[in-house]
């Protein structure tokens, strides 16, 4: 049985099945709380705990899935290309919005870390929470942060953005789909972008664009600040 759990096929199969169950439950109950990613995490943790499977054994297959994170994010460029005319008309507010969004995210995290007296390692781990996982991990790892904490922070931020973004758009009466998409992508990366795509085609494209711009801006800021 130990050999089965150490097989890369086990980690891949468990991840796929858990996420598939999450998607089915979300379609069944039609509520933001039934986020497929949350459900998948709970199910995977439950299986690992019940059968006493170590994270290292599971992650043999999990690392294979991680290999597809960057290509999957790059695929969002297709949606951006289809809205190139919108990008050309609004390039300045898009660029400024992404820069301000990235700076606000990083500075707010830094200020809260100072307020709560967190050490430098934790601060570095949390600062890139609003960019996509491959970029966040690179920033954290390259500056002495704890990668597992960074991954958890990124996932939590994305899930929170995915759940709250439709409500916040209605609350603040955001009518411009470009503004809505940029806001979602700037604060909750690829997980939020999946929700933006559900909201609208323009929102999804602009959210995907924000992932790329905010990722670059965050890397540049971290080079001078961290």
Image (cartoon, rainbow, N blue to C red):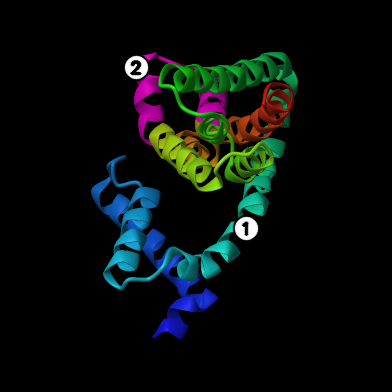
Q: Please name the predominant secondary structure of the magenta segment in the image.
A: helix
Measured as percent of width and height from the top left, residue 191 is found at 49, 42
Crowding at label 2, few (<14), some or many (≥20) Cα neighbours within 10 Å? few
Q: Position of residue 62 (x, y in %)?
A: 52, 63
Q: Residues within 10 Å of mark 1 (few under 14, many from 20)?
A: few
Between residues 207 and 177, which one lies in front from this camera angle?
A: 207
Taking the view exactly as shown, the residue that stands out farthest to the left is 29
Q: Callout 1: helix, strand or loop?
A: loop
In front: mark 2 or mark 1?
1
| Residue occupying the point 72% across, 38% down | 81
Percent coordinates x, y for residue 177 in the rendering: 53, 23
In this rendering, is residue 121 above or below 168?
A: below
Above or below, comparing residue 43 to residue 214 in the picture: below
Query: At which x and y percent is residue 131?
Result: 58, 35
Q: Can you tell which quarter of the image residue 77 is in?
A: top right
Front-most of residues 151 and 87? 151
Examine the rendered structure and indicate whether residue 6 appears above or below residue 184. Answer: below
Q: Which residue is mark 2?
A: 171
Q: Which residue is mark 1?
A: 68
C-alpha gap between disc 2 and disc 1: 35 Å
| Range covered by the magenta-colored residues | 163-187
At a point 36% along the width and 20% down the height, the residue shown is 170
| Residue for point 30% across, 73% down | 51
Split into 4 quadrants, where in the image is the C terminus? top right
């Amino acid at each position: 049985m130990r050999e089965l759990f150490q097989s890369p096929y086990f980690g891949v199969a468990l991840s796929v099945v858990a996420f598939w169950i999450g998607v089915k439950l979300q379609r069944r109950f039609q509520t933001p709380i039934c986020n497929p990613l949350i459900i998948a995490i709970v199910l995977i943790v439950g299986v690992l705990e019940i059968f006493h499977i170590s994270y290292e054994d599971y992650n043999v297959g999990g690392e294979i899935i991680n290999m597809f994170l960057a290509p999957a994010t790059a695929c969002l460029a297709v949606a951006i290309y289809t809205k190139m005319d919108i990008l050309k008309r609004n390039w300045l507010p898009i660029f400024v919005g992404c820069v301000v969004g990235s700076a606000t995210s990083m500075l707010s995290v830094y200020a809260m870390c100072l307020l709560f007296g967190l050490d430098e390692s934790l601060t570095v781990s949390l600062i890139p929470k609003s960019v996509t996982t491959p970029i966040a991990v690179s920033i954290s790892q390259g500056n002495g942060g704890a990668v597992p904490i960074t991954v958890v922070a990124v996932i939590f931020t994305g899930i929170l953005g995915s759940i709250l973004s439709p409500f916040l758009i209605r609350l603040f009466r955001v009518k411009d789909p470009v503004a809505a998409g940029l806001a979602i992508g700037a604060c909750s990366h690829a997980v939020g972008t999946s929700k933006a795509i559900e909201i609208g085609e323009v929102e999804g494209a602009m959210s995907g664009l924000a992932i790329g711009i905010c990722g670059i801006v965050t890397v540049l800021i971290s080079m001078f600040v961290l």
